[in-house]
Every structure is written in C-alpha cells, then in structure tokens.
Amino acid sequence: MSEGRAADVIVIGAGIVGAYCAHALARRGLDVQVLDAGLPGATAAGMGHLLVLDDNPAELALSEYSLQRWRDLAPELPEGCAYRSNGTLWLAENPEELAVAEAKHAVLSARGLACEMLGAQALRETEPELRDDLLGALKVTGDGIIYAPNTARWLLESDPARIRRQRAEVVEIDGNRVRLADGTWLAAQAVLLANGVQAGTLCPELPIVPKKGHLLITDRYPGKVRHTLVELGYVTSAHNATGPSAACNIQPRPTGQLFIGASRQFDSVDPAVEGWMLAKMLGRALHYMPGLGDLNAIRSWTGFRAASPDGLPLVGEHPQRAGVWLAVGHEGLGVTTAPGTADLLVAQLLGETSPLAPQDYSPQRFFGDTAHA
Amino acid sequence: MSDAVDLLIIGAGPAGMAAALAAAPSGARIALLDDNPLPGGQIWRDGPHAELPPKAREMRARLDACANVRRHAGCKVIALAGPKRLLLEDAERGWLLAYDKLILCTGARELLLPFPGWTLPGVTGAGGLQALIKGGLPVDGERLVIAGSGPLLLASAATAKARGARLGRIAEQASLGAVGRFASALWAWPNKAWQALELFDATYRTGSHVLAALGSERLEGVRLQVGKRVEEIACERLACGFGLVPNTQIGEALGCALSDGAIRVDAWQASSLADHYAAGECTGFGGSELALAEGAIAGHAAVGMLAEARALWPQRQRWQGFADHLNRAFALDPALRRLAQPDTLVCRCEDVPLSAIGGRRGWTEAKLSSRCGMGACQGRVCGSAAQFLFGWQPPAPRPPFSPARISTLAKLADAAESQAPDLSSARTPG
C-alpha cells in the first residue's frame, strides 16, 4: 500500500463547486489536488442560471453574496464561459402571483438589490414573445447566466502551480486520506467532498438525494428572448415536495439558442430522457410562450441535482469524520452559489471570520448534537 | 389520438421498398416512412435530373398498387413514445404511430472527414454531390475532382459527367493492389463487373488522397497526395466521400444490439429485440442488391412468411460475399487521420477546430468544452469523424432524433398518460 501526502487539501469532484473551492484555496496559498471520476453530475447538465432566490434568509444571503462575487469575477472570465448579466423576469399570471412578485420585490429592494416591477404593458414591450395576458413581472437586474463546464475548467486551470488535477475515482474516505480505485492511498491535511450527487456513495450518512431534471435546447433564434423567463406559479400552486414537477424556465443563450427547463423528479436515478416528463416541461414553456411550438428543438438531456432535505447546501466540517469537509447538497443552485460556498469553506478551514453566517449551512444541522467520533 | 399499424417500415430505400412489397401479400396494415418526398433512398433518389433505373420504377409502381401499404413521405422519427410506439413529424404535424412489428431500413450516411479547406463552398460529399445534381444543381462545364474511397466515387463521377462536368481526377485512397484484387474477383458478380467497366474513368488513380481544398472565398483547386508525389489540380468542385456510416440511432434507442457499428441481425433479419427487424445499409454496408435481398427477407419474416424468406437466403449470401469483398478492399488508410491541421474545423455547425478537441478524453468532454457536436446536425458529421480520428464512442442517442418542432415533442404528453403521475408545479427554478 503506497501512501503519500498529495497536497494540503484533496478536493473530490471537479464540478463548479469543487472547482471554485480549489481556486479559492489556491488563492490562499494552499496546494490542492483535485480528483474527479468523470461521472455525470449537475455542472455539465444544468442551465447555468445565476439567480438570487429568497425562499428563506439563508438562501437569499448565500445567493446574493455569490451573485456579487460572479459580477466581480466577470471581467476576468473568458468568452468561452459565456457569462451574461441578462436579468431574470419572474412572470405573474394572476393576481396572487402578482402579489408574490411584489412581495419579492420588497424583500430584494430592501437589501439594495437592483430590481423593478414591470406592468403588463411594459412586460409585453420587454419580451413580446410572451403570451399577452400576463399581469406583469418582477425583473431582477443583476441575475445572469454562465456556461458552467468551461467556467469550472477555467477555475481549475487558473493556478497550475497550486492546483493539480487527476482523473481518478475515490472509493473510500478515511479521515484525511482517500483510497483510489487502483488501490493508491492519498493523504492531505483536509479532504473536501464536493462531488454533488455522488457524495452518498462515499459518505452514506449524508442526507443527499438525487433530483432528476430534464433540459432541452433549440436551434438558433437570435433576439427572440432577452431575459431568463421563470414562472412564479410554484409559489401559488400546491406544494409538492416529493412528486415530479415542471415549471417554465426559458433562457436565451449567447448563441441565440433557447434553453428550456425545468423539471424535477425524486424517484429516478435513470439518466434516460423520459418523453412524458419532457412533454410536461415543454407544456409549461408553451403555456407562457405559445410561439415556441414552431421552433426546432435540437437536443434534450437530463442531469441530477444533489438535494438536501431543507434545500440548503452542507458547507463545513463533517460532524462525524475528522479531516473531512463538505461542500455538497446545492440542488439547483450550485452554479449560482459556488463562490459563496468556496468563501464559507475557506474561512472555516482556515479558522477565519466567515463572510456569511456559517451555522445556516453547517452539516451539523442534520446530525443532532453528536460531536466528532 | 394515435394511429396503429401491423408493420411499420422506417426508410423507403431499396431495403424498405423490398420489405414492404414482401410483406404486402399478407394483407397486414403496413406503413412505410421516409424523410424524402419519394421512395428510392439515396441510390434511387428522384429529382429533376434523376434517371431512375427500371427496377426502381417497377418497385415504386408495385408499391403504389398495394392498398394496404400507406406511404408517409417527408416524415421523420423524432422519439420513442412508449412500448411499440413512435413520435413522428412531417411538415404539417407531429403524431404518434403504434406498431406491432418494425423493420428498420434507415440506411447509411456518408463519412466526411475533415481536411484543410473542406468547409469551402464547392466542397461536398461524393454522395452529396450526386444527390445535389439529381436535385437540379447545374455542373455543366465545371471542373470536378472526386476523392475518398469506394465505388460511390465512380457512381458520383458518372452522374456528374452525364450532366456535363469535366472530371479532373478520381482519387481513390485504397492501394492499387487492393483495388486490383477487388476488380479481379468481380467475375463472380458479372453485373458488378459490367457496372465497374461502364463507370470506369481514365482519371481514376489509386493510392491517392486529398490533402487540402484550396481557395479563399470558394474552392479554386485541390492538393492531392498521389503515391509519394503531391499534385495540385484546379477545379470548381470537389466531392469527397470516405465510405458510409450505418444509421443505427433509432435502432440503438429502441435497444437493438449493435455489432461493428451496425444493427446486429440474425438469418431472418431479426434484431436482438423481439418483433424488431433491420435490413439494408443500417446493418452494414452492402450495396443495393444486398439491401433488396435483406429487405425482402425481413418483410417476409415479419409477417410470418418464413418459407419465402428462407428461399432468399442464397441470394443474400451471394451479395453478402460481394459486400465483404468490397469492405476489405476499401478499408481506410490510417494516414487519413492526419489530414486535419490544428486550425481545421471538425465541427462546422459550431466552428470548432481540431485544436479545441484534440487531447480531450472522449466525446462528451470534447463536446462540453468546445461545443463540438452541439449544432443542428446533432453531431452526425463530426461525431463520425471523431470516431474515426480518435476512436471516441458517441453516447446513446437521445430524443429528438432529428431536429423537431417543440409542438411535436409536446405531443409526447399523449404518449404515456398512464406512465406519468399527476404533476404540480416545481418548487424552484434552475
């Protein structure tokens, strides 16, 4: 059995969260070894929607902080990362949803976030392809989009002296050391688990479940849509935490293509595109933009979000495994909240003051009062 | 909501036409789909400048006379829609079609390999040029070079010459020895020997391959490797075809096993999936005679006419021998893997050069990092090229199998009401 100290920190997972953490650790002068098994995750499959969400204060704080960090980073990002600050429109179809949009507007405005209410007429002028009987929309100006696979790679290539990458599958974690599929043991001061939906295979005690999503992309139709268009319907419809669901999410890509989402399924680990789910999802998009029906779709695919029971990620030290740190459970917000996650993680790892309240994201919340084994 | 047939045949080339004609006497309700306006496939493609052979005209007339064969022209298969049901699209509508038995006659597409200048206007595939000419493209007086491999080069040259093109060269990559051995064995298939003699052209050279298409705005000439020499020939058109790639996508999506990149079939042309048959080029390159025999066997077998199917086995075996012979002779020279330069586009939909994908660990990684294969051709061209260049296996096909209207895909909701639980809206986006 060979064993060596691979680096200061071993990061498992080269998706957007692992890549951002590796980048942040390297900027603090730490040597990082990134291990990735090449298994499917969320980064390569997702929409790359950067958005502020306010379902609860912790989510709002993390997404707001992270959005600002993306905007700070934007000038450095190469064109291949396809960053755009195109804003999100939350569409209101009935008075109830309009009230939700206004409440959201109040919350975001109070925090100084750039946003505005669009009335029916203003909405029609802003996005003429939408059905013309919508009541209005909340526009969140600072939201954006990014192409996450290239951004993750760019972050990992940002400091070749400090970040080393290896295609390897970790089959066991034992404190601050890991065993690879070929039998090699690697050790570091800390091991960071950032492998999203795969986290459960290495740490079955983590409360992470896969949530399957479908996506579809059209041929190029430049200028049809400018903002990312999201329905508010979820707020007013019956809450359903376990059944499959679909919501309208239409995002214009810099190529002129349109991304169409989004779906959620809890019960599936099969990556196949399921026709009925795809159709339900497209049905939601067609409901808001009937003209979509004549556009050509060229590809569809699926991915798996790593969901935690309360919808917030687990960021911090593993309560039961000394030397193991976690940055998992981001569900659909991993791309948005990768910068905030990295800063939270680095601050805790180095014993510094965190820019965000770490207890809101602490893995401890799922482990009761148990201390380190 | 959904139509149903006893036998669905996808592809109306020689194999599909033969399958429909073989199955028709059973009285089964048969649907014959093709994405072209008229039956005939690539080899019997119709158009203002096409002259169909008598066999093709005769088969088409017989098909028209079969009251139980419904033809769906200009129609594409878009997605699976539950067990034994497909989502289809034509210019007017998307709809679901259920079937009891299926025969895949999905043919093959040309293998296009990237080389410097291959995206210049004036450069096409060899079969592609033939199709364009049959469709009415004028080539009268144009200087033409044809390069690549296999008998399609000669067929394409003959079509172009008949329309007044001036042939500068046919460059066959296979060696003189390989082509010579092939030619000297043709006595066993006399009609093929005659065909070869008729099609033969004085400009035919073996051991030759394209190095680059030359020109700035459009094609002005071609640089060829001819044995050890490099030669340049001025021309307005260059047609390059490096053989054929079986269209296995729908079969793969259905779950039919592949073998050597083609749909695997048994003596009855049955695939590994019960009630699903395959015939013609999608089961491996063999030419129209083999496709006709295979199609007829599949058609008979699918409706239970086993004696009639068995009677055609010797005919199939004879043409399979020819196909094996041909595939050995025109195997691609590994040197063709080195034609593309770092700045040569591999994916022309998304303008991705070789340098952007070389060194990646596989098709998915290359695609995610460079957009290679993300365009409207769905990676059909660059995916096959990358498979030849790097040995990368493309992932399993996903719907839509062809670009399709979103309104068509939304019809999948009708497909499986029973499979889908009740939906409420999603909690969060993203």
Image (spheres, coloured by chain):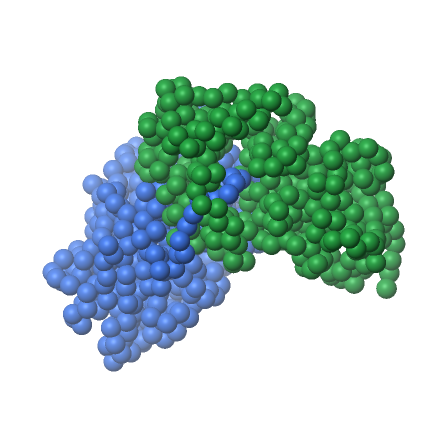
Viewport quadrant of the C terminus of chain A: bottom right
Which residue is depicted at the point 32% across and 42% down?
B407
**Relative to B410, B46 lies left or right:** left
Residue B31 is drawn in which quadrant? bottom left
Q: Residue drawn at (25%, 56%), measured in percent from left and top?
A: B2
Query: Residue farthest to the bottom?
Result: B307
On screen, residue B337 above or below A64: below
**Chain B, chosen colour in render:** blue
Query: How far from the left and from the top, in percent, is residue A102?
Result: 49, 26
Would residue B349 be visible to someone looking at this image?
no
Q: Count the marks.
A: 0
Residue in the image at 85% along x and 38% along y = A351
Viewed as shown, does residue B275 lie left or right of B240?
Answer: left
Near-viewer residue (A295 or B309)? A295
Rendered view: A193 above or below A288: below
Of the pair A290 and B423, the residue shown nearer to us: B423
Q: Colour of chain A?
A: green
Is residue A307 or residue B359 the one in the foreground?
A: A307
In the rendered image, the vertical position of residue B263 relative to residue A11, given as above or below: below
Return the residue nearer the eye: B66 or B154. B66
Q: Quadrant of the image for the N terminus of chain A?
A: bottom right
Q: In which quarter of the image is residue A209?
A: bottom right
The answer to whether residue A223 is seen in the rendering is yes
Q: Position of residue B405 (x, y in %)?
A: 34, 41
Which of the 4 quarters of the picture holds residue B53? bottom left
From what the image shows, is residue B141 above or below residue A321?
Answer: above
* Spot occupied by residue B269 in the image (x, y as percentages of width and height): 35, 70
- x, y percentage for residue B320? 37, 68
Q: Which residue is drawn at 48% across and 46% down?
A: A239
